[in-house]
Each structure stands twice: as structure tokens, then as C-alpha cells.
Image (cartoon, rainbow, N blue to C red):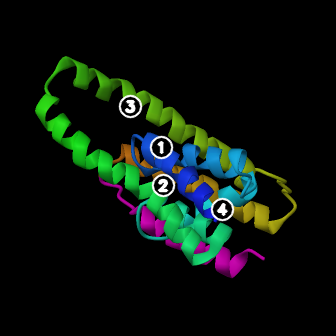
Amino acid sequence: MRILLDLFWGFMKPGIFGFGGGQATIPLIEAEVVDRYHWLTNEQFADYLAMGNTLPGPIATKMSIIIGYDVAGYLGAFIALLGMLLPSTLAILVLFNLFLEYKDTAFVKGMQVAAKPVVVVLIGGVAFSMARTSVFKNVDFASTNTLIVMGLFFVSLVLYFLNEFIPSFNVHPALIVVGALLIGGFFIR
């Protein structure tokens, strides 16, 4: 019973403070499941995050389900998901009505502007941490697997920048993920 309460509270915090979307919630989830409760190691978290990004749906809810299931089975998945969704559901119902009423005030506009750089830094921090613990850890350039992983990293980076800066170049991120999964499945051993 204690583990279910911990799962609920552990995911309720990111659900409450996860402003800026699912990716901005990831560092908050990581702080709870890796640093506070020690349910996962940094490496396991990076693996689950990578797996979660290959599945359809919002990343924060997928992470709560995956981690909740790992910690306490189906009931754990449900409780973690409930903890993640309950705060935002209630907040949306209440705060969106307030936002609609006050959206044109200087205070609310200032809050929106101030939140954006913080969210960008949080997302960048997760990307850096994930790269450090899953892509660049134990790099052995004599290994074919390492060369494939590094190649996928840099090809994905190039494709991202091409998509970002050349409007006519448009490769959907899902194609990049599926391509990487197929390359990993066929060539990484």
C-alpha cells in the first residue's frame, strides 16, 4: 500500500509543477523516480525515456505508466497515471477559466514570457543528461554498435536542423524514430 501512495505522490508533483508540456515534466519525474525514491537508476530512466518516446501519446503520461508498472504492476501503472493526470485536469478546469478572463493583462502576459526560457533550459537539461548517460557513456569507437549509435545521433541531429532551418525539407520525426528502431533491430547486437 505504501508503494502505491508513493507512486501517487511521486507523480502528482510533476503533474502539479510540470508547466510547459510533457518534455518539461521529464526533469521533475526524474527527480522523483531516480533521486528521491530510487525506483530507477539514471541509465534505466534514460532507457525508459527512449522507449517512451517511441510510443504514441504524451511523454509524461507514458512515463508514469511505464514506471508505475515497473514498480508495482498494473495497479501501480494506474495509480502513477492518476497522480500525473489529476492535478493537471483540475488545474485546467479552474485555471483556464481564469486565463480566459485575464489573458490580456500585463501580469499574465509577463508570466507567459517568463516561463518560456525556463522550459527551454529544462528540456535542454534532460536532453544533455540523456545523451550523457545513454549515448555517450562507455564509448568504444572500436565497437560497431557504438559507431551505429553515434551515427544515428548525428544523422538525427542533422535531420533536426534541416527540418528546422529549411522549410522545404520536411522529414516527420516519427520516420526518424522508426528508421532508428529498424537500424537498431537489424544491426545492433
Rendered image: mark on residue 3: 4
Q: Nearer the viewer, mark 2 or mark 3?
A: 3
Residue 106 sits inside the magenta stretch: no
Q: Nearer the viewer, mark 1 or mark 2?
A: 1
Q: Mark 2 or mark 3: which comes first in sequence? A: 3
Disc 3 target residue: 116
Q: Against 86, is 27 above or below?
A: above
Q: Which residue does the image show at 71% across and 65% down from the upper left?
A: 148
Q: Amino acid at mark 3?
A: Lys
- Element assignment for label 3: helix
Could you tell me if residue 180 is visible in this image? no
- Element assignment for label 1: helix
Q: Nearer the viewer, mark 4 or mark 3?
A: 4
Q: Amino acid at mark 4?
A: Ile
Q: Mark 4 or mark 1: which comes first in sequence? A: 4
Tell me which segment is drawn in magenta. 168-189
Disc 1 target residue: 24
